Image: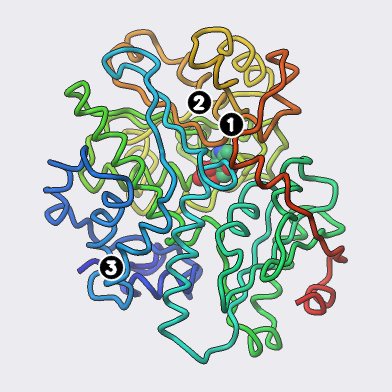
Amino acid sequence: MTQFVSTRDPTHSVGFGSALLQGLAPDGGLYVPRDWPRAALQTLFATGAELSLPDLAAALIQPFAGDDPLADEIGAICAEAFNFPAPLMPLLPDAKLSVLELFHGPTAAFKDFGARFLAASLARLRRAQAAVAPLKILVATSGDTGGAVAAAFHHRPGMEVVVLFPKGLVSPAQEQQLTCWDQNVLSCEVRGTFDDCQRLVKEAFLDPTLRSRFQLSSANSINLGRLLPQAVYYVASSLQVQAASGHPASYIIPSGNLGNATACLWARALGAPIDRIVLAHNANRTVPDYLEEGELRPRPSIATLASAMDVGNPSNLERLSALFPDSAALRSAISAVSVDDTAIRERIRADYLRTDYLRAHNIWCPHTSVAAEALARLPEAERAAHRWVLVATAHPAKFGEIVEPLIGRSVPMPDNLAQLFQRATHKRPLEPTLASLIEAM
Ligand SMILES: *Cc1c(COP(=O)(O)O)cnc(C)c1O
């Protein structure tokens, strides 16, 4: 039975449900699987190409639940969380190049998969616990995370979400997604920066008064309950590529905090037919420099057009290092490139005109553009030798103010986003102090 261990102490192990409730291990480490249930998944990898996404998700995640209290609920959780598709769209014949569209969820970015899985799981863990203090999920956000988490927890009994975002520092579309909720979601506009929002969350977790009144939890990407479900779309799409071409899939992943990259590595570790993994970073070069120089130098983040990837010290690097303890081992497992804003703009402009698919979809969002540019920079032989999948992390309509001037037309909102834009917004102004956060809560 798979247990989860801390990256900092392999002797500290917990079950699936505890890992989800705790978020972070008590020693500050991140939870990772103690072993890989490859044998239990052999049948899935032999036959999974025909399964629906929720069924494949349940089959993949079930062995991790062991005899945890959640084990009997995995099927229901996956049916609830994976209720929108992750289509693989061919750009070249014979699966030589495809786009994995991860933006069909309620907030039009891949974070919906993990947020919905976590919400569905915590709702069931809460029911099993009964009579404990109300659960408050605290989220500091610079954009996409807060919206996905708010959407996933909205209207769920017994759980409340407090979103903290920096005043004036999120795009208009992002602000709409952060504030269009009511009831059990409290959206706080903090007079400060994203760092202030993160500091407030940390202070809240350490505050004895809050801890005595509420059960506090976090829903950022260090939570296993957001990460593991992301392996599902790598397994599903790699099986499709293999069924179509007889070859494993190789991925180019727009990366920031490395959650998506870790999920792809986990899918490969579990036995999915995955070959190359390329991490596409914006001008925040921490990971590409680490692979090149062998020395990790975290640094403050710099603002780019692909803002959801503006991370100078990726927290999931600790999980990658747990899989590949030194930089040489990591370098043989993945590669990484860095793309600046000029190249992001040029790639959106140039690719828009290239194919009917690209034009019809107003491609790319600035994050996916980083991956498209990384593909263009691969040596010709390398590009021809593999079945490449570009991971499309968000819909371009979320970033209309960047994309529209480049392609010279407006980007129509897909239905999922249009629905959010019809909703009334509510926000509470907040001073960047713990006292004002406590008052708001
Ligand atoms: C969060 C996000 C990313 C970065 O993903 P990580 O898992 O943090 O590496 C990339 N693109 C979009 C659109 C995002 O919202």
Quadrant of picture, ligand 1: top right
Q: Secondary structure at mark 1?
A: helix
Work out whether residue 178 or residue 197 is closer to the camera in this orientation and state it. 178
| Nearest to N terminus: mark 2 or mark 3 | 3
Q: Are marks 2 and 3 in contact (CB under 8 Å)?
A: no
Q: Is residue 312 visible?
A: yes
Q: Secondary structure at mark 2?
A: helix
Quarter of the figure that contains the C terminus: bottom right
Quarter of the figure that contains the N terminus: bottom left
The dot on residue 162 is none
| Nearest to N terminus: mark 3 or mark 1 | 3
Question: Crowding at label 2, few (<14), some or many (≥20) Cα neighbours within 10 Å?
Answer: many
The dot on residue 367 is 1
Work out whether residue 120 or residue 424 is closer to the camera in this orientation and state it. 424
**How far separated are the C-alphas under marks 3 and 1?**
33 Å
Lateral position of residue 194 relative to residue 358, left or right: right
**How far separated are the C-alphas under marks 2 and 3?**
33 Å
Q: Residue at x 23, y 70 (%)?
A: 66
- Residue at which label 3 appears: 65
Q: Secondary structure at mark 3?
A: helix
**How far separated are the C-alphas under marks 1 and 2?**
7 Å
- Residue at which label 2 appears: 371
Q: Is mark 1 within 8 Å of ligand 1?
A: yes
In the image, residue 111 above or below residue 399: below
Question: Crowding at label 1, few (<14), some or many (≥20) Cα neighbours within 10 Å?
Answer: many
Q: Residue at x 19, y 57 (%)?
A: 37
Q: Is residue 257 visible?
A: no
Q: Nearer the viewer, mark 2 or mark 3?
A: 3
Query: Which x, y percent locates residue 25?
Result: 46, 71
Q: Residue at x 37, y 8 (%)?
A: 380
